[in-house]
Image: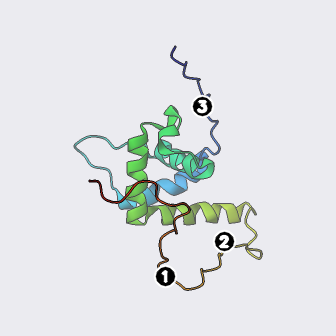
Amino acid sequence: MARRKTQVPPLETIREIPDELWARIEPTLLEFWPAKATGRPPAEWRRMLEGIIFRMRSGCQWGQLPERFGPKSTVHGWFRRWAEGGVLEEIWAVILAECDELGGGDWRWQSADAMLGKARSGGGERRAGTPPTAARRAPRRAC
């Protein structure tokens, strides 16, 4: 008997970009990717950015993005282009400036998190194999 696949309800949007903030972000995107007169129209950048923010805030896999953000491969493709081209850093600067204007960022207090482990004594030396725990039952050579 085959098991039924359980339906997982979609996660709610953690953050949607307000119109005022989008008006400040869009010129940054147009600076890197100006509109073309011909060819296929680009994906809706606002949905792509909301999908990227959702993915970063929730920690979900790209395949678990809700459908309202568009195809996962398209969202991931724009994430890669923007990350490699430095666009995400520019967008992040705009978002941080908006946060500062709203009084949302307190830069006097910061925190860092790390995990440190003690190194093994002896460095990278290889150990000998595990010693046998019982006598061999079969002879090494067969007749």
Q: Residue at x 50, y 49 (%)?
A: 49
Would you call the spot at circle 3 few (<14 residues within 10 Å), some (14-19), or many (20 or more)?
few
Determine whether the residue tagged by mark 3 lies in a helix, strand or loop.
Answer: loop
Question: Is 60 on the left-hand or right-hand side of 106?
Answer: left
Q: Crowdedness of circle 1 by 10 Å Cα count: few (<14), some, many (20+)? A: few
Type of the residue with mark 1? Gly
On screen, residue 131 above or below 4: below
Q: Earlier in the sequence, mark 3 or mark 2?
A: 3
Indicate the quadrant where residue 75 lies: top left
Residue sitting nearer the eye, 18 or 131:
131
| Disc 1 element | loop
> What label sits on residue 19 in the rendered view?
none
The residue lying toward the viewer, choosing from 49 and 8, is 8
Q: Residue furthest bottom?
A: 122
Q: Distance between the Cα atoms at labels 1 and 2?
A: 21 Å
Q: SS class of the residue under badge 2?
A: loop
Q: Position of residue 58 (x, y in %)?
A: 62, 47
Q: Which residue is mark 2?
A: 115
User: Residue 82, percent across and down?
Assistant: 41, 58
Q: First in sequence, mark 1 or 2: give its number.
A: 2
Q: Residue at x 62, y 64 (%)?
A: 96
Q: Is residue 99 left or right of residue 54?
A: right
Between circles 1 and 2, the one closer to the viewer is 1
On the question of residue 30 being in view, the answer is: no
Instruction: Quickly name the residue at label 1.
Output: 124
Question: Mark 2: which amino acid?
Answer: Met
- The residue that mark 3 highlights is 10
Q: Taking the image as drawn, is residue 139 in sight?
A: yes
Q: Report the amino acid beneath label 3.
A: Pro
